[in-house]
Amino acid sequence: MSSIDENEKKSYAICRKLLSHPDSIFLIAPLSHKRYIKNDSLGVFIVLSDKRINITNHVYNYDVNLTQIISDKLNNLFDNKVDRLRLEFEFEIKSQIKHSLTTILGKLI
């Protein structure tokens, strides 16, 4: 990351920390392809969009242009995080299944 400016490096580091923070909440907007990270305990809100990152709290707002490489890395990190959460969610749902299809069918007859 030596050819990347300091604001981009710092923004990248902030986003990575929020991605791994347990209090962060994630949202993807399917039409605009924007990715959102909200962390109330740290008071930080991030929007990742087309080669840009916007970092906001109650005191400051930074809008930083990203190189294509850094933008792609952050998007991949975000998408992988959300996909891990999705897998955990699906596992939780499936682990609560108590009846087999045979049992359900038997109750319907």
Image (spheres, rainbow, N blue to C red):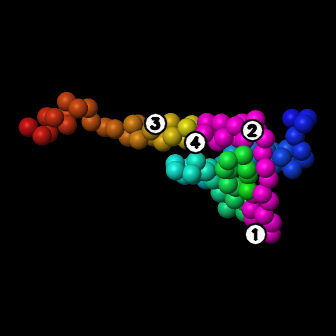
Q: Position of residue 62 (x, y in %)?
A: 80, 59
Question: Comparing marks 4 and 3, which lies closer to the viewer?
Answer: 4
Specify the amino acid type for callout 1.
His
Sequence-wise first label, 1 or 2? 1
Picture quadrant where residue 74 is located: top right
> Which label number is shown at residue 58?
1
Find the residue positioned furthest to the left.
109
- The residue that label 3 is drawn on is 91
Name which residue lies at 79% across and 53% down.
64
Residue contact at pointers 3 and 1, CB within 8 angstroms? no
Which of the labelled discs sits on residue 72, or is there none? none
**Marks 2,4: beta carbons within 8 A:** no
Q: Mark 2 points at which residue?
A: 68
Rendered view: 66 above or below 99:
below
The quadrant of the image that shows the C terminus is top left
Q: Is mark 1 on a helix, strand or loop?
A: loop
Query: On the image, numbered disc 4 is attached to which residue?
Result: 82
On screen, residue 68 versus residue 106, left or right, reads right
78 left or right, relative to 55: left
- Going from the N terminus, do you reach mark 3 or mark 1 first? 1
Sequence-wise, which precedes: disc 3 or disc 2?
Answer: 2
Query: Visible in this render: residue 78?
Result: yes
Mark 2: secondary structure: helix
SS at mark 3 in the image: helix
Q: Does the magenta stretch include residue 99?
A: no
Residue type indicated by callout 4: Val
Image marks 3 and 2: residues in contact by CB distance under 8 Å: no
Task: Determine the residue positioned at 87% across, 50% down.
Answer: 7
Q: Which amino acid does label 2 sit on?
A: Gln
For marks 1 and 4, give the CA distance. 26 Å
Q: Quadrant of the rendered structure where residue 78 is? A: top right
Badge 4 local density, few (<14 within 10 Å), some, or many (20+)? some
